[in-house]
Amino acid sequence: MTPREIFARMQQEWFGRSGPLTGDLLADDVIMEMPFGNPARIEGRDAWLAFANPARAAFPVRIDECHVTAIHDTTDPDTIVVEYELTGTAAGRQGTAPFIAVLTVRDGRIARWREYQNPMAMARISA
């Protein structure tokens, strides 16, 4: 699958439903980077799932929509830059937060995902 196809699947699987993530879209040796997050870097599918699933279960915001504002191709055909917004609801309040992600695919799976976000934007919804 191409990076654009992978991101379309991510929209359905990661943002479009609740419940645990399976890791089906991830390479075994995936690198997940969140430069403004904690942790800032996670290496490996199992390590990512061990972090992401408990965090997802405890996250007080229900993601209602993922709206892609732009997808930029790069000189590397396996890498795209995606600008998107997540809209979520918590305690009857709704809000939207912008994100930028750099997605690299290898052999039809996510090999590297670097996500830039304002962690306070979604936190404000649940405050």
Image (cartoon, grey):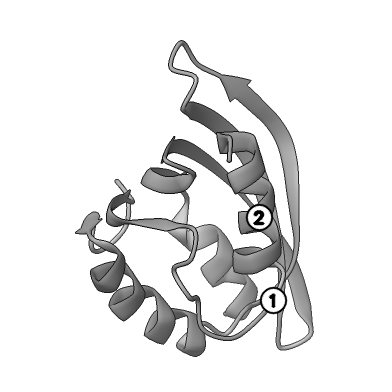
The residue shown at (49%, 44%) is: 108
Question: Distance of mark 2 from mark 1, alpha carbons?
Answer: 12 Å
Asked if the residue at tag 1 contacts the one at tag 2, i.e. Cβ–Cβ closer than 8 Å, the answer is no
Residue 103 vs 110, above or below: the answer is above
Amino acid type shown at disc 2: Arg
> Which residue is disc 2 drawn over?
9
Amino acid type shown at disc 1: Arg
The residue shown at (59%, 66%) is: 14
Q: Secondary structure at mark 2?
A: helix
Q: Secondary structure at mark 1?
A: loop
Residue 91 vs 41, above or below: the answer is below
Q: Quadrant of the C terminus?
A: bottom right
> Which residue is disc 1 drawn over?
17
Q: How far across and down, in percent of the image, does residue 50 sit?
A: 29, 79
Drawn side of residue 51 relative to residue 16, left or right: left
Drawn side of residue 44 relative to residue 99, left or right: left
Q: Residue furthest top?
A: 75
Disc 1 crowd, CA 10 A, few/some/many (<14, 14-19, 20+): few
**Mark toward the viewer: 2 or 1:** 2
Query: Going from the N terminus, do you reach mark 2 or mark 1 first?
Result: 2
